[in-house]
Image (tube, rainbow, N blue to C red):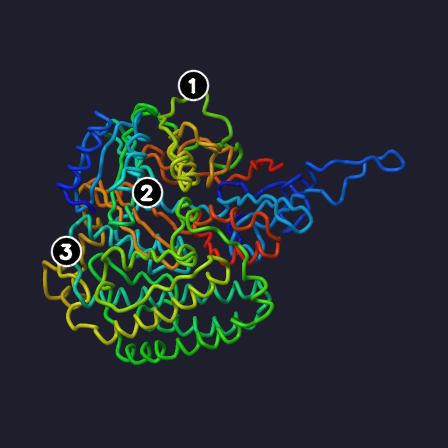
Amino acid sequence: MTDGAGIDASGASASPAGDVVGGTAPCAVAGGGGSPAAAGPAGHSVPDLDREIMTINIGPHHPATHGVLRLVVDLEGEMVREVRPVIGYVHTGIEKSCEDKSYWKVIPFVERMDYVSYFFQMEAFCGAVERLIDLEIPPRARYLRTLFLELNRIHSHLVWLGTTALDLGAISMLWYCFRERDKILDLFEMATGQRMHTRYFQVGGVIEDIPLGFEAKCRAFAEEMPIRVGQYQDLLDRNEVFLSRTKGTGIVSRERLLELGVTGPLLRAAGDPWDLRKAFDYLVYPELDFKIPVGTVGDNYDRYRVRVAEMVESASIVRQCLDALPDGPFIADDRKYVLPPRSELSTSMESLIHHFKLVTEGYRVPPGEVYYSIEGPRGELGCFVLADGSAKPARVHFRDPSFVNLQSFRDMAVGGYVADMIASLGMLDPILGGVDR
Amino acid sequence: MPDAPGLELIRGEIDRDYPGAVLATSFDRAQAALIVDPERVLEVLRWLAEQPGHRYDFLSSLHAADYLPAEPRFAVHYELINRDRVERIRVKAMLGGGRPAGPVTAGDPPSPATAQGMVPPTAPPPGETEEELPEIDSCVELFPTAHAQEREVFDFFGIVFRGHPNLTRILMPDDYVGWPQRRDFPIGGEPVTFTYSERSYD
């Protein structure tokens, strides 16, 4: 994780060392409070060690917080009595900066919010703009987008599984998960030229077609992935350490999760089959055959099982997309919004003009506002775009699932052990780039 | 989504129970929206969430937008979902107020001294009186998920949510001055300052 807070204009991280609750050292013991003090034999005030509440700082730089998240935890012994997540350390004002960019330049910007699910951010933004300008995207582009979204979902869950299992002491899981993650990144690189932050989705479709050989490589990966998931499960499902840290910990009821607006695997682990891919029609999900894994009690183990099962379903979606991938254009043919093919630039004056206009000013979007939400790896990822008729959006807002889901963390952690709190945080899977934006 | 006639039916039903609470409806790009009186937004939200047969009881997103130079310039958007019928509806409360859109605004480019990082922007610019902030009722009791999202709106737009249990800045530092997502707040020119702005968490 990069040291984002150090360059943050907020200055919120620059607390002087030795402060009561500040200090940059992870897990610095900060001081007691609220404990009844008993008089010792010499008349000194001796704190009652059995009942002492100790406030501990975890983060903002701590490997277990999966980003620049700070947890101010009140501990009584090992029990968590209160937890206050403090966020904002990697706030970079992306939403504000987007207001100064023409629409096509916003795409690489929003990718960097939730930096492990960049395809989802692109789809949310491009989908919102396409709804604003009422642009239909061709079938091949819809399939390609779905394909890459699901590859990205596997990628995101692999990062989650590797790092969370690492938090629970299973270091080999990290290597296995990142081995498969690297294969996904290889696929991304093959199709888009970039391993992360690919800028592959464009308003109107995708920037270029998949190259020769991609299909075979992708298919091989999609065939292999369920086997690998089975191997992960063999390592973890009956692992005593893993089970005792996940079974029955961090339970939040389904009703409470709904009150808190929690979506995604966390909600599904509590037994609610709410998945925007099924609920609302977008891309080609209505044409695909896939299941929504749900849990029963909603503990950390269910969250793990739901995500692992989702990886298998996503691999199946990838296979179906490859099977059904139609021929045809990969981007819409509307020259007012879509760049003309490179080959036309030297022969067609009109294409040259369109290209010039699109690259310099960008396209203008008629006034209006759209909220478009998709099922991200962490839940509902919504994008609100307000257009004022100019070539730049007047407002871009992302409803980031991590930001909303983080509110349920207190319910998961309070009353449990501090070790279970770390497990709960891993299973919550917040991406702080998305939380702070 | 309710279709356009469905939206009008919902409006008619709300009008029966709370006459005048809904000011207008809008059906644009297949998205249904009720534009409500900001003073009565809680009535409408509660009706939508609890009315049998409707039950738009899942608040998926709460965000704000600044429509400068329109007046009223702010809007708070509530994106509600009816999970039984799988329908979305947007409730929009337009809020005036804030500073009138004049040439001098809260987000003037920093003075040279500030730009060099010499003076942390902790105090309001001189000659500026206490700012009148737009206000709306908080819906945290109805939708606990709004807690962080209302704080975010307050943080970026300076919209005060009456009755919010802890309305403080959430992403910006506590001692930050200005409302950065407003349209009259300039982009760029923000000096990098390191101020001690930690709250005490005793």
To which residue does mark 3 refer? A354
Secondary structure category for the residue under label 2? loop
* Subunit ID for the residue under disc 3: A
Amino acid bearing label 2: Asp
To which residue does mark 1 refer? B129
Q: Residue pushed farthest right?
A: A42
To which residue does mark 2 refer? B57
In the image: residue A139, left or right of residue A157: left
Please state the horizontal and vertical placement of residue A54, each as a whole percent of the image.
68, 44
Please state the horizontal and vertical placement of residue B96, each as a whole percent of the image.
29, 25
Q: In the picture shown, does residue A400 fall above or below A269?
A: above
Q: Are the residues flagged by discs 3 and 2 in contact, CB closer than 8 Å?
A: no
In this rendering, does residue B108 appear at all?
Answer: no
Q: Are the residues flagged by discs 3 and 1 in contact, CB closer than 8 Å?
A: no
Q: Judge by depth and name the residue closer to the eye, A274 or A113.
A: A274
Please state the horizontal and vertical placement of residue B46, each as a whole percent of the image.
32, 34
Amino acid bearing label 3: His
Dot 3 alpha-carbon crowd within 10 angstroms: few under 14, some 14 to 19, many 20 or more: many
In this rendering, does residue A388 appear at all?
Answer: yes
Residue at 43 percent of width and 56 percent of height: A270
The dot on residue A396 is none
Q: In the picture shown, does residue A177 fall above or below A247?
A: below
Name the quadrant containing residue A419: bottom right
